[in-house]
Amino acid sequence: MPTCCVPGCTSGYRNDTSPSVRHFFSAPSDERLRAAWNRAIPRADKDLTTKSRVCSIHFHDQDIRKTYVHVINGETVEIPRGKWSLVEGALPKVFPNLPSYLSKPAEKRRKRQRESNGNAD
């Protein structure tokens, strides 16, 4: 079983007593994104490699794809994914076993403003 490389995290270790299921994500193969992960994870003793794993508790829910979304006959259907994936550009920002100042809050998504069609009836 893989283990999480974030300091203080016991996911994947024998002494992990958490009842919740954890999913693990490989560090990105893209060097720029992997460098961003290195900056985000407070670990000075070693850098991430493509074989490093980070568990799902270190990501905000909005950064994880847990379902497939399909539109069938005009109705949206969500099917659970067996293997979760990350959205493009997701960074680990939640570190519950470390001081709170190291965790970053989730970014609020901006609502798109509707464009008016120019008709003021």
Image (spheres, rainbow, N blue to C red):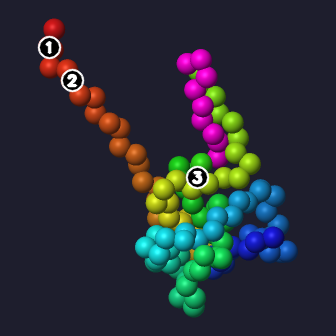
Give the number of the disc on residue 120: 1
Q: Is residue 40 visible?
A: no
For the residue labelled by badge 1, is the local secondary structure a helix, a strand or a loop?
Answer: loop
Q: Residue at x 64, y 46 (%)?
A: 66
Q: On the image, numbered disc 3 is attached to which residue? A: 64
Looking at the image, do the residues carrying marks 2 and 1 touch, with CB atoms under 8 Å apart?
yes
As drawn, the label of residue 116 is: 2
Q: Give the amino acid at mark 1.
A: Ala
| Residue at left offset 76%, top offset 72% | 2
For label 3, count other residues whose C-alpha is less than 10 Å away and answer few (under 14), some (14-19) or many (20+): some
Ranked by sequence position, the earlier of labels 2 and 3 is 3
Residue 80 placement (x, y as % from top left)? 70, 41
Label 3: which secondary element: strand
Asked whether, in this view, residue 31 is left or right of residue 98, the answer is left
The amino acid at mark 3 is Ile
Element at badge 2?
loop
From the image, which quarter does the N terminus lie in?
bottom right
Residue at image point 69% right, 64% down: 24
Numbered circle sitting on residue 11 = none
Measuring from the top left, give residue 6's x and y in whole percent: 62, 76
Q: Position of residue 9 (x, y in %)?
A: 68, 74
How far is mark 1 from mark 3, CA to CA? Answer: 41 Å
Q: Nearer the viewer, residue 99 or 36?
A: 36
Magenta highlight on residue 91: no
Left or right: where 120 falls relative to 107: left
Magenta part of the protein: which range? 66-74
Q: Nearer the viewer, residue 121 or 99?
A: 121
> Residue 58 location, x and y as percent?
60, 64
Q: Is residue 88 above or below residue 45?
A: above
Give the farthest residue toward the right. Answer: 14
